[in-house]
Amino acid sequence: MSASRLIAFAAAACLCCAGSSAQVTSERLVNSAKEPQNWMTYSGNYSGTRFSGLDQISTRNVHSLVPKWVYQLGSTGKLETSPLEVDGILYATGQDDRAFALDARTGRPIWMYQRQLPADIRPCCGRVNRGLAILGDKVFMGTLDAHVIALDAKTGAVIWDVAAADYRTGNSFTVAPLALKDCVVLGVSGGEYGIRGFIDAYDAATGRRKWRFYTVPGPGEPGHDTWQGDSWKVGGAPAWNTGTYDPSTNQIFWPTGNPAPSNRGAGRLGDNLYSNCLLALDADTGKLKWYFQFTKHDEHDWDATQVPIMIEAGGKHRIAQANRNGFFYVLDRTSGKLVSASPYGKQTWSDTRDADGRPVAKKEASPTLQGHTVCPGALGTTNFMAPTYSPQTGTFYVTARDQCDIFSTAPQPYEPGHAFYGSAYFPSEESEPYLGFLKAIDPATGQTKGMFQHTSPTWSGVLSTAGGLVFSGDAEGNFIAFDASTLKPLWHFQMGGAVYAPPIAFALDNREYVAIAAGSAVYAFALP
Amino acid sequence: MFKCLRAALLASLSLAFAAQVAAQRNPLAGDPKAAKAGEYEFRINCALCHGLGARGGGRGPDLTAARKKHTHSDAEMFQVISNGIPGTAMPANGTNGQGVGMTDREIWQIIAYIRSQEVKTPARPVGNAAHGKELFYGDANCSLCHMVAGKGGRLGPDLTSIAGSRTSEAIIDSVRNPSRRLAAGLTEATKEFPQEYETVTAVTADGKQIKGVTLNEDSFSVQIMDMSEQIHFLEKDHLRSFEKTRSSAMPRYGADTLSDKDLDDIVAFLMTGVAK
């Protein structure tokens, strides 16, 4: 977008907020591309592209980018939040279920919500939260004690608070919810505890649950026979990353995670539906339209919870996912049929395909009692790091790592609320040094057409912009702008803390900003 | 109803273990099944730093020694695992951002496992510590790069407390094969431990060659201590070249350079004679 178009967008936004301050209608969310100055959903739009139409910051001037403000949370632990920015206010989340609103021009706080969490929660993998959803005059958050809450966007006051599940058996929420139409959709975390996974939709006005889709089918439901005995009761299949939404078909595309116990397939023989799937659900009812299972009967903790991205290609409606198992998948969004599956990192678990072209696990890749090396490792070729797709370059960008682990297995009885892995993984002493990359993948061919190698693997997400740029962070604390065509770094800034979050972009007062969380702070950058 | 029963069960288990924590003894001591369960818990939660078999990793001490660096009794060990060790890389249970953290019962299982791995009566170092000290500061040239009790060089790790974190065998292996661990690569657990002692060579724009070890590095900059302990802060895009190898700056001491007996003497100094 040119500077003049940016001004036009800014003027339109001012007119809008003069009439309906902070009201985010579902129409605005559907038409988010018309207001690139705002970042209103986890991925910036319903397609999941994490692409910003702003182009004031470009390959020509990014070298002069400077920090405009820093907001310090003053707390410890990781920040995985993807902020929202709407009409001049930035909304984000922090450790231990903090939520806060900042003046997006200055970084000065407007309100802070701090949840009083029970002392006995045991969330896996950090007391993290990946962000909020916004609709009307409320923001929505899933909590570590498995509640869903609505906060007043102007004050942070609790409007409603509903318990979705029992946290004591390992249920929690870390996902950024997705607001659509009049409801809020989110999926549960807890695949490490043998929960029974689900995706829920709540009425945004009241908090009443509208529907629930259990990702592990119960008796009599299709797919139930893919679980041995009673294993379905503790089958896992969480849904802890944000899906996408196609308003034209009123379908949600939501990814699911590993079956439990993660490292032991004995006792849960079968495909274990709908673990490690992409699900197409009716947005009004939660009814299953189709599913595609990436890793059947997974024994390596390869959650398929990576953000799927809707891509239009020559009249074809595709959806693409860089999967934790090391393959980049492109599906037909209408039918759920596989179009292509291409390795984009080091993998040793599959060298054959089934009739649909889906990679099939080698028998010898199964974990053993003594343990043996399989690639990728349990952390996967990628993980929760949000990817991006730039329609400008036609390229999918994803944070990736090459790492192998020793996978072992052993019987483990289920105990409510206790870790339920069925043994473990740990670094392979024979493996190469862990390598971390930003990779550029052509969805048309599945081929990796460019990469940047980080000093060490990073957990940062990726943003692309109409300025011909890709932004990401690294484990050493750098925020980096890359040329989207070459992945050559054009600018970097040392933020002083490792990055576990994805960047966003927004605009105010004819000025484009990029923002990202690092260490225990949120940073915003703009041209001088 | 099921939920109520389950909650009651959880509560009673918690109470039982809380009582045992207060009693400061491992309720699972000597139970081989608990030790086996603890082995798997150890792999999930501890092996990243403390290594497989608790024999020490890139970051955490070897735990197979009966006498540990920070903790001796079961109760102390329980406290250390639960709360971490302030001022060190040892995190409190459940706060390392990976894995789910452990229940009290699982911590006791890990302690049972660690006890099962301990070498109860480690052989005392066979060498002569006094002679080892002479060699360390003299003919073997160890102190050119290594410091003990404030005396020595800075290029290599400070070995003052090595007795608490490494076995004699590990020290001997490091002397005979100094690059072995580096070759295995920078693991997740050790990457925040920047001083990896990789040998690096940088050539500046004006052609000056700087060889040494990295103190820290990212994609755009590197801090190098050269062989004369000068520290250089360099931006990579200003360098003519920058190369690093996964071989240690420490020379390999073969038996022809340092006899087995002399090495035993140095190990004896490091294991028993440092304080003397």
Image (spheres, coloured by chain):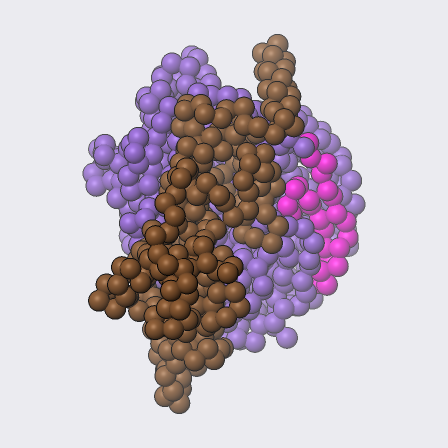
- The residue depicted at 42 percent of the width and 15 percent of the height is A230
The furthest residue to the bottom: B206
- The residue depicted at 53 percent of the width and 68 percent of the height is B150
Magenta span contains residue A355: no
Locate residue A110 relative to residue A363 in the image: left or right.
right
- The residue depicted at 71 percent of the width and 31 percent of the height is A161
Q: Quadrant of the C terminus of chain A?
A: bottom right
Locate residue A151 relative to residue B67 in the image: left or right.
right
Relative to the observer, which residue lies in front, A68 or B220? Answer: B220
Relative to the observer, which residue lies in front, A447 or B276? Answer: B276
The spot of residue A45 in percent (x, y) is 54, 48
The furthest residue to the top: B1
Asked whether residue A61 is in view, the answer is: yes
The spot of residue B114 in percent (x, y) is 45, 36
Residue A99, by quadrant, is: top right
Magenta highlight range: A92-118
Asked whether residue A172 is in view, the answer is: no
Residue B265, by quadrant, is: bottom left
* Chain letter for the brown part: B
- The residue depicted at 36 percent of the width and 36 percent of the height is A300
Locate residue A42 relative to residue A350 in the image: left or right.
right
Locate residue A291 relative to residue A136 in the image: left or right.
left
Residue A319 vertical placement versus A481 (above, below): above
Relative to the observer, which residue lies in front, A150 or A480? Answer: A480
* Chain letter for the purple part: A
Magenta span contains residue A105: yes
